[in-house]
Amino acid sequence: LRCLAQTFATGEVSGRSLIDIGSGPTIYQLLSACAHFEDITMTDFLEANRQELELWLREEPGAFNWSAYSQHACLIEGKGESWQEKERQLRARVKRVLPVDVHLPQPLGAGSRAPLPADALISAFCLEAVSPDLASFQRALGHITMLLKPGGHLLLIGGLEESWYLAGEARLVVVPVCEEEVREALVQSGYEVRDLRTYIMPDHLRTGVDDVKGVFFAWAQKKVGAGV
């Protein structure tokens, strides 16, 4: 949350349209973004995750309570905004929740309702979690890059040196990536890496649901001439 807030505070990552790639059932990754984009598209491969997002967006009974995250984002940003105002703004600016498959050359499919190319992309804990190997990770990054306009920004968050995680009782495979592999993948996909930070996971946060060693945060800008 702090990395996202600090990056949006620069004022450089803004525009009309933002696409969140592989949202999962979560909204935290958009809490600082929503003040800077009026048209936000959330996406996920799983219908169950998309349904969970719709519950929160419609404020329906049974929706997950994200208020602790919203409050923390407001605290980090220090703008005096209430968490209720932040959540109202995010709900108003998410215009659609769509299926996505990052392994397809057109991840949103043909004739998508999302405005393309987007001014910015966010993707948190998606690409490495759905890619069986490093080559698939690189291809998936290339596919989503085609959704972004030249000069647009990508904020990419993921696990470092992670090989599995548990989703309920299912043990899912993750491609382990290191900082340099993330940097190289971004450069190969036509980005200038503006910022790349890594964090080692402290022991008290290692709960046995995965073997992740740390987290990376990358801010990358698509080079002009890199294609649409």
Image (spheres, grey):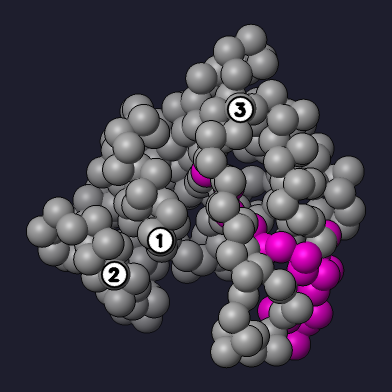
User: Which corner quadrant of the image does residue 62 belong to?
Assistant: bottom left
User: Which corner quadrant of the image does residue 150 belong to?
Assistant: top right
Residue 1 - label: 1
Residue 175 - label: none
**Residue at image point 30% right, 76% down:** 68
Q: Range of the magenta residues? A: 155-175
Numbered disc 3: secondary structure = strand
The correct choice, above or below, for 8 with respect to 13 in the image is below
Asked if residue 141 can be seen in this view, the reply is no
- Number of marks: 3
Q: First in sequence: mark 1 or mark 3? A: 1
The correct choice, above or below, for 98 with respect to 25 in the image is above
Q: Amino acid at mark 3?
A: Glu
- What residue is pinned by disc 2? 72
Depth check, front residue: 166 or 223: 223
Mark 2, other Cα within 10 Å: few <14 / some 14–19 / many ≥20: some
Depth check, front residue: 184 or 133: 184
Q: Is residue 81 magenta?
A: no
Q: Are marks 3 and 2 in contact (CB under 8 Å)?
A: no
Q: Amino acid at mark 2?
A: His
Q: First in sequence: mark 2 or mark 1? A: 1
Mark 3, other Cα within 10 Å: few <14 / some 14–19 / many ≥20: some
Distance from disc 3 to disc 2, alpha carbons, whole Å, reads 30 Å
Q: First in sequence: mark 3 or mark 2? A: 2
Task: Point out residue 35 in the picture as x, y percentages from the top left corner.
Answer: 26, 43
